[in-house]
Amino acid sequence: MKRQAGSLMNRERSSRFSMLGILATTLVAVSFSTTSIADEDSGLYLGGGFGQFGLEFDNIDDAVEDFDFDDSDQAYKLFAGWRFGPYIAAELAYMNLGAPNEQFDDGVDQGVVEAEIDGFAPYVVGTLPLGMFEVFARVGYLFYNVDVNLELGDDDLDIGDSESDEAFVYGVGAGVNLFEHLNVRLEYERFEISDADNADAYWVTAAWRF
């Protein structure tokens, strides 16, 4: 059972390391290509936000016949970034995606499957300023840890497993600039988590641009 629960995330390392290399190369290229942009549009920013993370799997555990996992939970993130100008930024975020869970009853066993996910993600963020408003897109890579817990109520049995993995992340959003330094955004992000049919999040974030 433990090994079956731990099989939630299968790895595809070669393609993911290739994506990580592309991301790193992009960050280096951006830092050199934006040095001529005005200093007033560059600099450090710090922020955080709250959101809702949803996770969906089909047949999450072979031990539970026809069990589909589909739940969401509250999430939060903290981030720091550097704006190379008004159009490009590099960002690093810590995300706690909560603990989505789903009850099951296959006629033999009853219980709850829970998946706790958190990790760090480097991003490249592209922004289009529109006066005090802006739209943006981001691309990055999430290095995360997932704790999968299987609780069988009848036997009072709690089985857990933990592993680390990586996922390609991308998103879009819109924001508004207030009081010269405060940036407030609405964001949508998609996580390409292995074997997940759907993994995404909606965020409300705020950042202070120094």
Image (cartoon, grey):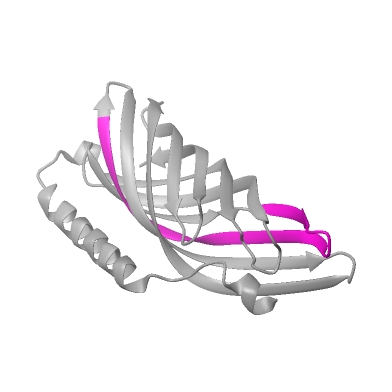
Residue drawn at (32%, 49%), measured in percent from left and top? 139
The part of the image, by quadrant, that contains residue 162 is: bottom right
**Residue farthest toward the top in the current orientation of the protein:** 131
State whether residue 62 appears in this view. yes
* Residue 43 percent coordinates (x, y): 28, 46
Q: Quadrant of the C terminus?
A: top left
Question: Which contiguous range is marked in magenta?
Answer: 100-128
* Residue 180 percent coordinates (x, y): 36, 28
Q: Is residue 109 magenta?
A: yes
Q: Is residue 132 above or below residue 105?
A: above
**Residue farthest toward the bottom in the current orientation of the protein:** 3
Q: Is residue 182 above or below residue 10?
A: above
* Residue 171 percent coordinates (x, y): 38, 42
The part of the image, by quadrant, that contains residue 176 is: top left
Give the dominant element type of the magenta stretch: helix, strand or loop: strand
Q: Nearer the viewer, residue 43 or 4?
A: 4
State whether residue 99 appears in this view. no
Judge left or right: residue 209 versus residue 107. left
Q: Nearer the viewer, residue 163 or 102?
A: 102
Q: Nearer the viewer, residue 1 or 208?
A: 1
The part of the image, by quadrant, that contains residue 136 is: top left
Judge left or right: residue 61 versus residue 210. right
Residue drawn at (57%, 50%), measured in percent from left and top? 55
Q: Is residue 68 above or below residue 50?
A: below
Residue drawn at (64%, 53%), measured in percent from left and top? 69
Q: Is residue 127 magenta?
A: yes
Q: Is residue 183 above or below residue 23?
A: above
* Residue 167 percent coordinates (x, y): 42, 60
Q: Quadrant of the N terminus?
A: bottom right
